[in-house]
Amino acid sequence: MRGRPVLGTRVTGVPYPLIVLRHTDSPLVMSAVSFAPLLPLLPLLPLLLVRLPVGVLVDRRTGVG
């Protein structure tokens, strides 16, 4: 059951920016519409940019993994 909502989100992620581009003729607005669904993931950015590489370095120094 969880696959259908995800599929619907992925499928609508393509035409919406194209519709916006057609109506506004602005690649900047199209980019904003394309980027908008990623906004909830911004709090995870420090985790990916800092914590994950540091964890890899610690694992290499301690011989874990």
Image: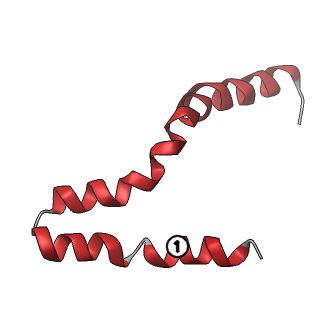
Residue drawn 51% across the image and 43% down it: 40
Q: Quadrant of the N terminus?
A: bottom right
Up-down: is 24 above or below 45?
Answer: below
Q: Which residue is mark 1?
A: 10
Residue drawn 64% across the image and 30% down it: 53
* Label 1 crowd (10 A; few <14 / some 14-19 / many >=20): few
Residue drawn 87% across the image and 20% down it: 62
For residue 34, side relative to residue 28 (left or right): right
| Residue 65 location (% of width, % of height) | 89, 37
| Residue 4 location (% of width, % of height) | 67, 78
* Quarter of the figure with residue 64: top right
Q: Secondary structure at mark 1?
A: helix
Up-down: is 37 above or below 40?
Answer: below
| Residue 16 location (% of width, % of height) | 33, 73
Depth check: 40 or 62 in front?
A: 40
* Quarter of the figure with residue 18: bottom left
For residue 23, side relative to residue 9 (left or right): left
Up-down: is 36 above or below 8?
Answer: above
| Residue 3 location (% of width, % of height) | 71, 75
Q: How many callouts does the rendering have?
A: 1
For residue 30, side relative to residue 6 (left or right): left
For residue 15, side relative to residue 63 (left or right): left
Find the residue positioned furthest to the right.
64
Three-letter amino acid code at the position of disc 1: Arg
What's the coloring here?
secondary structure
